[in-house]
Amino acid sequence: MASKLLALRSLISKPLNLIVNQTPQKLDFVYNLKSFSTTSVSNINFFNKLPAEKLWKSVTSVSNAGAKKGRGKGAGRIRIRDLNRGQIIGVGKVNMLWPGLSAPVIRGRELLKQQRLPDDPERMEKLIKLRDSMTKFRRLKLSPIERGWSGSRMPGRSIGPPDPVVDEEFTGFDTKVLQLRSLLIMKGTLGRTRNYQAMVVTGNGQGLAGFGIGKAKEAPAALRKAKNRAGKKLMNFEIYDGHTIFHDFFTAFGKTKLYVQKKNKGYGLSCHRAIKEICQAIGIKDLRAKLEGSNNLQHIVKAFFIGLLQQRTHQQLAEEKKLHLVEYKAENQNYPTVVASPEYVRTKEEIPKDETLDFIQYVMNDRVILRRKKFPRFFQTMPHYEIYLKKYEKYRNHEKIRLNLKAEYGEIKSFLNDKYPEPKEGKEE
Amino acid sequence: MSLLKLVQNNTKSAFFRCNEPKIFLISSRKLSIVPSIYDGEDPAPKFFSSGIQILLKRLTRPDFAKVFRKRNNSNISVLRTPKYKFVTDEELRMEKLKADKSADRLLQMPPVVKVHKPIDDVLSIDPALIGYDSAKYLFTDISFGVDNEHRTIIERDPDGTLRSCDHAERKRLNQIYFPMQGRKIREPLIFQDEEKFHSLLDRLQYEYVLDRACVQYEPDEPTYHKLTSITYQHIDLKSMYDLLRSTRHFGPLAFYLTWHKSVDNLMLELLQSADVREAVLLLALRQALHGDLSSGEESSALVSQILPTPVQLTKKEQLSEEDIQLDTKCIECVDKYINTNSAMKSQQGLALQGFREHYQQLVELSRGLKKAHGAA
């Protein structure tokens, strides 16, 4: 037993001795041609046989059926990364200095030698970070000034003035996209193809504006076509007092109905966003528009333009009615200003009994806007609201009093405070 | 006396503060304006006489665009959409009449009256009440329908004297029981603080100052007279009459200047802006107040011819023969005044000469035009 163990030990120790003893012999450098391995070493595998493109495809592709179900979209989606990004030839895991590859051959008067430099532990981290940054989905970020109605989408965005037509430049013009959508059309040879349709409005903000529709295979081409068509179809609109329309009007196109109201200075544009863009292109600053019926955008735009074109100026209205048109402004203490007078003015006897004399009713062509009855807020009918009103009635002027006291004394205090000062918290120590 | 109201007068000091003549010291240091008040002859009868009222209103030169301008102190915080109406000629005339009426209301001049006399009216002396209390007792009649002027307000002093209250106390109590909108019980800082008052004047906020003074003070208060006097003189020095034109304060300004015989600056401004008719009206006003002008009779006679003509807001392009006749008379009248009574002879003479030359050109132009049109 013991002999066996000894033999085993000699066997184990033998290779060691062999190595130790044979090392000086190996310095002769003899090729081992006799004992080569016959087992195949495969240096070609799945990963280096195929190009990166195909490899990535195998990871990211979704079956046709899956794509229809919506797979491969959204949060869990795998994205293709460019693993070559951030890698430089000559720089690897081991930080080596390769003269002529990663460093110059001669530095100063010294010939550089190939050598190992201390390892850069951060290199891999940097690479991973760079690769990670590629995987996250980044939205196209726009500055708030360039932004349209919604994110980076085209509607609402400005695309500059139309292209000049034979030396005629559109100075001072700006074009806004109102609609950009893709349409699918069937073709005999190609089957279903995609087409883009754009609707834009262009104007100089001083009464000159037009809209255009363009169709093309690509979105930018459609936009360009629409813009240039809009530039060729300019219309002139008179603006009342440089800020609003001449009178309220009703206009419709198809099932779209629009009630447009003239407003005072400073009111702003309270209307559909497309109408707002049109108004800005024309130069209208104050207006209210209520949309009824279909909200088809192209119909809205057409209805609004038709309405604007059908406006009558004050002089025209006065001539139609053969009466003076008088304006009353509340800020001018309702002083009657005659804005238009006809050549011949009718007398009271000449006016028929059933004639529409109300200005708004006349300009709306006898169409009456339905005004809904305003109901009290839900809490106003409840008993607690009355209690609240009674309770807080005595405080109703306190805010004003506080303000007056602050103006008079610089702080909130009573006239009795001089004689009977109130104890202050800080002084009690 | 339906209700006797007792005022425990432990805020005596506040009352005394009001009575101190601190506020009367207001005077412009930079411009050294000495306020002059109407304390001699009572100006009220002359100011309220219809002839002078008409003259003052005409001198105001009301421009409806300015009279009905947008005001910052109106109750409309947000502009409203204008309203429109179709009207016939007749209705338009009625609307214009209505507007004229409201313009009259907006241009109603603050009254110019004499400074009030202090009230010193002892009703009774009861020595038995001496030392009854350390405070004054104030009694106010707050029965309905009595106006502030004639309200009975009396005080019982600690020494047993029962007497009528003085103006300061009356005003204070009236304001407590019957508050007037915009009037403060304590004087606003802009009138207390000389620095602030003058900064307002330097910023040419004359209308604001005068409006505020009208609300805060009674027209017969000495403080009102001082403040308005300083403001008027400031305007006169800076020749900023246009700021007050078309407002209700121009009448009192013209009256003040005429009353104190310092119209020459205003006269110069009128001649420079080629308003020779208004210059004659100003002479007529002076004649009516003082009667010391050599050309007085003529100016008074011209007034009846000038008044029916419309107010001239812009410079005329064309002249009719009547206009030319009237203006020539006016020029003569003003010329006479400049030669005899004016204190700024050379400047006014130059201004009149300039106006004459300009006027001669205008006359030739309009006559030539008439000839060219074939209307003789």
Image: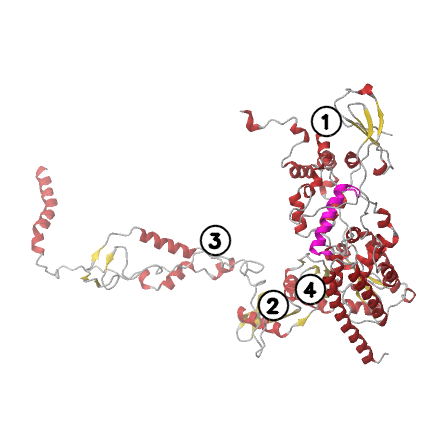
Residue A75 circle label: 3
Label 1 neighbour load within 10 Å: few <14, some 14-19, many 20+:
few
Q: Distance between the Cα atoms at labels 1 and 4?
A: 62 Å
Q: Are the residues under marks 3 and 4 on the same chain?
A: yes
Label 4 neighbour load within 10 Å: few <14, some 14-19, many 20+:
some
Chain designation of label 4: A
Q: Is residue A189 left or right of residue A90?
A: right
The residue carrying mark 1 is B10
Q: Are the residues under marks 3 and 2 on the same chain?
A: yes
Residue A99 circle label: none
Quarter holding residue A54: bottom left
Q: Distance between the Cα atoms at labels 3 and 2?
A: 34 Å
Q: In the image as oriented, which residue stretches furthest toward the right?
A: A349
The residue carrying mark 2 is A200
Q: Distance between the Cα atoms at labels 1 and 3?
A: 79 Å
Look at label 1 and name its amino acid: Asn
Q: Which marked residue is nearer to the observer: mark 2 or mark 4?
A: 4
Q: Distance between the Cα atoms at labels 2 and 4?
A: 24 Å
Looking at the rendered structure, the secondary structure element under dot 3 is loop
Q: Distance between the Cα atoms at labels 2 and 1?
A: 77 Å
Look at label 3 and name its amino acid: Ala
Magenta stretch, residue numbers:
B216-241
Residue B216 in the image: state x and y as whole percent. 75, 42
Chain designation of label 3: A
Foreground pick, A89 / A411: A411
Q: Residue at x 70, y 33 (%)?
A: B17
